[in-house]
């Protein structure tokens, strides 16, 4: 959050450096368009993204899959022979079989033999575009990792000041948008397949957990952008995290912490979960087709469960897993490069205390007065900043458990501390500060309150504030100097020097009206479904609609505890999603609404026509489904 002449020069350099790249792209930085229906408000960009996702999923259900009618490569599986316990060409010396290494090798080969990890064939029913979205989402994830790694090499400022860096940031943005969109569509497909059947519960759970980890990864990515959108998301998202007691440790306004979570910690967790999910798919294969007609009676349902658990013994077709992955990666590369070149990526500059003081000096002075008299939002917030406010509570207040982990005295932090650094070279300020500090706490509050009542009528002469006379003691002199320091960038420098980094400047900005006004103009505020939005006409994070929805429901939207309610309800919905395989009725929806008939229509037609493939001579390896 740099200010002053150097910041102005950097802004000019950034503008010149990005001009060439921006001129080649469609300008989506203009004001976005929004649609409102009932309690729902959504940007046209997000609406387009959701519509594209729905169209892609519908096309996957309806478009014929290549080669679905070819029967020449279909073979009927023979019963498998027992897998060897040791790899070909290697023997265990007698007495070594109880070694940990030998045991682990036997267990690994039994669970994941090579023909499962890299299968040559797949069940014949895997003949639908719906099966493609798993490997496509993996390809998009790979693209996001590579582009993010490149940005990390360039540094956190590279993409703000360099056209090449901005292009890689655009690649990163669109690869993430593709990854999240494809992952959501993949989740839709697996739900309508009832993919948790046949001892595949952990496959479903790891898939859902991977989706949740992806949301957190994307969220921390937004927080790491160092632009206005990331600032606003941080200052607003912190309310929910603070209410839940998490914000004391997971500080959304600490850029350094969020950046490390985004580039190191969460990616490791995400890749590990995705890896476990892929291994489970390789171990158990994809779920078998649901019967065209629902099983009737207990015996029929038990027979269907046994069939779901059994290994597939029906026809199989050729499956080149490496070729499929290569094609998916190429398609994702073409799409991301095309989108990055055509649409670029947003980068509204961050707001600083200096720009605030220059463009809205009256609001700055009024806010500084509230920091002095203790009436600002931060001054009366409560944990984790101070003990002045009442934390949100639904039965209990989790914020109280964490306590005051980031203590802030707003008068000292935002006003008195910065002024004290300038007092030695400013006699008038030094005298005003001495008078203020010598007064009682009650008198200090009275002065600041009196100043707050007349500051609404402030005028400016040659940029200097002229405040109507009031019983406000030394406060006018103090805050006039504060305004001068802020305009010079000294307040930004002082607040950034205080730890945790970035937190205090953002809290100061949030207490004023100028910051909120900018967010309102960009449709980022809570009543505008802002957590889903991006600046300009760019798509944001529509997959966060479930979290945002609770803020708009009648009866809750005006509650003082709405942040805590939203956390609770989103947590409950997440647990429900994870527990689908265990909940009767919920897990039966795919049987009641037979979308699965579209997914497996080619297989159902083949099954109805009778067997077309002949058994091959000799045993064949047991097939494994594709991702």
Image (cartoon, rainbow, N blue to C red):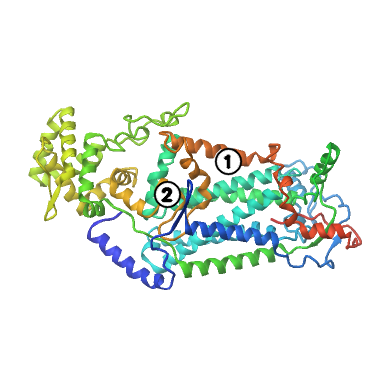
Say which residue label 2 marks: 528
Quadrant of the rendering where the C terminus is positioned: bottom right
- Rendered residue at 82%/43% (across/down): 295
**For this rendering, which residue is in front, 127 or 151?**
127
* 38, above or below 227, in the image: above
- Marks 1 and 2 close (CB-CB < 8 Å): no
The x, y position of residue 379, in whole percent, is 29, 35
The residue drawn where x is 75% and y is 51% is: 285
Q: Residue at x 78, y 60 (%)?
A: 602
The percent position of residue 430, horizontal first and vertical second, equals: 10, 41
The answer to whether 46 is drawn above or below residue 12 in the figure is above
> Could you say which disc has been placed on residue 233 in the image?
none
Q: Choose mark 1 or mark 2, whichever is in front.
A: 2
User: Please, what secondary structure does the residue beneath circle 1 have?
Assistant: helix
Q: Mark 1 = which residue?
A: 574
Lateral position of residue 265 relative to residue 193, left or right: left
Q: Residue furthest front?
A: 38
Count of residue discs: 2
Residue 525 vs 51, above or below: the answer is above
Asked if 149 appears above or below 259 in the picture, the reply is: below
- Residue 144 visible, this angle: no
Classify mark 2: residues with Cα within 10 Å, few (<14), some (14-19) or many (20+): many
Crowdedness near tag 1: few (<14), some (14–19) or many (≥20) residues, C-alpha within 10 Å? some
């Amino acid at each position: 959050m740099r200010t002053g002449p150097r910041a102005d020069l950097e802004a000019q350099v950034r503008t010149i450096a990005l001009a060439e790249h921006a001129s080649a792209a469609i300008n989506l930085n203009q004001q976005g368009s929004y649609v409102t229906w009932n309690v729902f408000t959504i940007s046209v960009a997000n609406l387009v993204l959701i519509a594209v996702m729905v169209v892609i999923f519908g096309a996957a259900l309806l478009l014929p899959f290549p080669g679905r009618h070819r029967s020449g490569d279909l073979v009927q599986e023979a019963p498998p022979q027992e897998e060897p316990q040791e790899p070909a060409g290697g023997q265990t010396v007698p007495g070594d079989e109880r070694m940990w290494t030998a045991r682990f090798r036997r267990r690994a080969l039994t669970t994941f033999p090579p023909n499962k990890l890299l299968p040559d064939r797949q069940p014949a029913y895997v003949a639908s575009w719906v099966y493609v979205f798993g490997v496509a989402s993996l390809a998009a994830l790979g693209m996001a990792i590579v582009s993010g790694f490149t940005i990390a090499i360039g540094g956190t400022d590279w993409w703000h000041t360099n056209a090449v860096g901005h292009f890689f940031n655009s690649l990163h943005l669109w690869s993430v948008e593709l990854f999240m969109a494809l992952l959501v569509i993949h989740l839709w497909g697996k739900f309508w397949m009832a993919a948790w059947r046949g001892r595949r519960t952990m496959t479903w759970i790891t898939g859902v957990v991977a989706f949740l980890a992806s949301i957190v990864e994307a969220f921390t990515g937004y927080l790491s952008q160092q632009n206005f959108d990331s600032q606003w998301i941080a200052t607003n998202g912190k309310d929910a995290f603070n209410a839940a007691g998490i914000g004391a440790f997971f500080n959304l306004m600490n850029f350094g912490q969020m950046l490390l979570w985004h580039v190191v910690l969460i990616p490791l967790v995400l890749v590990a979960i995705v890896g476990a999910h892929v291994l489970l798919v390789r171990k158990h294969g994809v779920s078998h087709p649901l019967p065209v007609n629902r099983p009737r009676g207990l015996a029929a349902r038990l027979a269907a469960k046994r069939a779901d658990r059994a290994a597939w013994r029906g026809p199989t077709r050729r499956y080149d897993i490496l070729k499929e992955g290569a094609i998916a990666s190429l398609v994702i590369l073409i799409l991301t490069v095309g989108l990055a070149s055509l649409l670029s990526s947003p980068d509204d500059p961050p707001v600083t205390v200096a720009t605030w003081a220059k463009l809205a000096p009256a609001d700055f002075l009024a806010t500084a007065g509230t920091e002095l008299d203790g009436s600002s939002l931060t001054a009366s917030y409560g944990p984790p900043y101070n003990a002045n406010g009442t934390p949100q509570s639904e039965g209990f207040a989790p914020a109280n458990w964490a306590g005051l982990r980031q203590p802030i005295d707003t008068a000292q932090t935002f006003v008195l501390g910065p002024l004290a650094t300038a007092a030695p070279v400013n006699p008038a300020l030094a005298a005003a500060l001495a008078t203020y500090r010598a007064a009682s706490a009650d008198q200090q509050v009275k002065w600041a309150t009196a100043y707050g009542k007349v500051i609404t009528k402030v005028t400016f002469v040659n940029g200097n504030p002229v405040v109507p006379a009031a019983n406000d003691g030394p406060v006018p002199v103090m805050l006039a100097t504060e305004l001068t320091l802020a305009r010079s960038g000294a307040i930004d420098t002082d607040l950034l020097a205080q730890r945790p980094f970035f937190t205090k400047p953002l809290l100061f900005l949030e207490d004023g009206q100028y910051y909120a006004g900018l967010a309102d103009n960009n449709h980022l505020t809570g009543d505008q479904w802002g957590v889903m939005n991006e600046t300009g006409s760019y798509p944001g994070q529509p997959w966060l609609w479930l979290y945002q929805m609770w803020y708009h429901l009648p009866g809750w939207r005006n509650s003082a505890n709405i942040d805590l309610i939203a956390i609770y309800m989103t947590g409950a919905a997440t647990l429900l999603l994870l527990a689908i395989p265990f909940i009767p009725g919920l897990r039966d929806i795919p049987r009641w609404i037979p979308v699965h008939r579209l997914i497996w229509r080619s297989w159902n037609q083949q099954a109805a026509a009778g067997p077309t493939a002949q058994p091959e001579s000799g045993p064949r390896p047991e097939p494994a489904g594709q991702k």
